[in-house]
Amino acid sequence: MGKQRIVILGAGLAGLSAAWHLQNKGIECLVFEKEPDVGGLCRSRRIKGFTFDCDGHLLHFKNKYAMQMVKRLLKGGLLPHERSAWIHSFGMLGRYPFQANLCFFPKEIARECLLEFLKTRQSEQDEPPVNFLKWIRSSFGKGIARHFMIPYNSKFWTVPLEDMTSAWTGNFIPQPKPSEIVKGFFAENRHRFGYNSTFWYPRQAGIGQLAQAFGRQLRNISRNSPVTRIDLEKKEITVGRRNKFGFDALISTMPLPELAKIIHPMPAGTRRMFGKLRWNSIFNLNLGIKGACQPGRHWIYFPHKEYIFFRVGFFHNFSAGTAPAGNSAIYTEVAYSKERPVDKSSLVQRIIKDLSACGILSKDNKLAVLDINDIKYGYPIYDKNYSHATGAIKRFLSRNQITVCGRYGSWQYMSMEDAILDGKNAAAKFKR
């Protein structure tokens, strides 16, 4: 049997990881990336002395192999941070997570949240919650649900929470023990809750350094090379208008809805499954600011509607190299979707206005740089059709020697570490 012709679609983190692991096993592959450079969303831009990532991206490690690999790639240039995350609510800042730090908020609100939470501990759940909204109420009680969980998640996901399942929540929403919630009612709770309580970031600025480190070690990456057609019958891809390449197997990290546009032929039933996929989008405005801004804080959540963004983060507190000395580099995130569109023509002005209104920008701060990333595919939405649709799609792709991986390729809520390991797992399917 001759060598397999393996083609990877997309040089984001998962695609780079898959290619890196294949190459380390002595297996050749071709990588096609539509953008001028590798990285996907794991990219950084340097503008007038400021370094901005394409939205906020941090490394969280649960897997020793992934940590050691990333440290080798970055040659030790990686710094650990203890998370300093906050919530802006009721006109004040409280430490994250809300449910374990009720002491920061008005006493009547905190009391309601605690009493309603304790009621949930007294009632037994006969059946698991049927949707995300009911999961929130049964997990945290009506008070925490009303004052944080529902407004924040509605703002973030942009769809009715009763349309969503809770299948994704396990790794991403902290669920403190009852004793920790009671403790946080009386005093600040500094316990390390959640998967991102510790994170890592490059020492010299910019998460894009990780993708660049992968790219420097890889052969056969074609940049500016959009794949425009996949012919399943001929086992052939078209790159650009007319360049054709045969394949025995594909590894696709393209967003699933985009993959659906270029595969031919496709059964009508499979196409209907692709049509059931839903997602939100993220409008990411990065700002270079003259002057100091929120020293020591990493990011702030904004659950309520009076501010357009759901989160604001501070690159300069991840790495001093992201901004000239004495200045600040920040990112803001606004979620939108077909269900909840935004007026992009006035969005930048609204974000800047709200940053001033909430106290992040002062009169002494001056804008030096604006950097916009309008991210079409933000987060896959786990609705009632999610499992059935993605299962049917992946079975169809597998029958046609297409392996999907990564956050958008496999259509899953993933951390950066998850994407790296998913690329490794995709590569493991092939033998030399």
Image: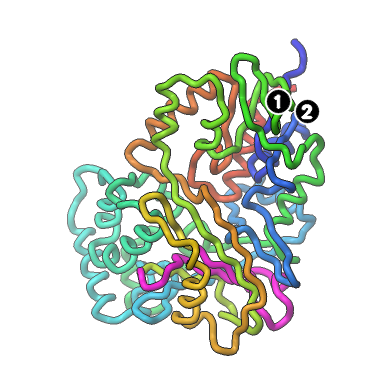
Q: Specify the quadrant of the image occupied by residue 57.
A: bottom right
Q: Hey, which residue is sitting farthest top in the picture?
A: 1
Q: Quadrant of residue 102?
A: bottom left
Secondary structure under the numbered disc 2 in the rendered image: loop
Q: Looking at the figure, which quarter contains the N terminus?
A: top right
The quarter of the rendered structure image containing the C terminus is: top right
Is the C-beta separation of discs 1 and 2 under 8 Å?
A: yes
Position of 370 with respect to 103 (left or right) is: right
Of residues 372 and 110, which is closer to you in this image? 372
User: What residue is pinned by disc 2?
Assistant: 28
User: x, y (%) of residue 279?
Assistant: 44, 46
Three-letter amino acid code of the residue under disc 1: Ile
Q: Label 1 neighbourhood size at 10 Å, few (<14), some (14-19), many (20+)?
A: many
The correct choice, above or below, for 208 with respect to 104 in the image is above
Most extreme residue toward the bottom is: 364
In the rendered structure, find residue 40 and report the number of the disc placed on it: none
Please check the rendered image and state whether residue 326 is part of the magenta-colored stretch, yes or no.
yes
Q: Residues within 10 Å of mark 2 (few under 14, many from 20)?
A: some
Q: Amino acid at mark 2?
A: Glu
Give the mark count: 2
From the top left corner, tell me how far across and down residue 329 is, in percent. 64, 72
Residue name at image x 49 percent, y 46 percent? 413
Q: CA distance from mark 1 to mark 2?
A: 7 Å
Q: How is the image coloured?
A: rainbow
Stretch of the chain drawn in magenta: 305-333
Which residue is located at x 35 percent, y 67 percent? Answer: 99
Q: Is residue 367 left or right of residue 381?
A: right
Q: Nearer the viewer, residue 140 or 399?
A: 399
- Give the residue at mark 1: 6
**Depicted 392 relative to depicted 15: above or below:** above
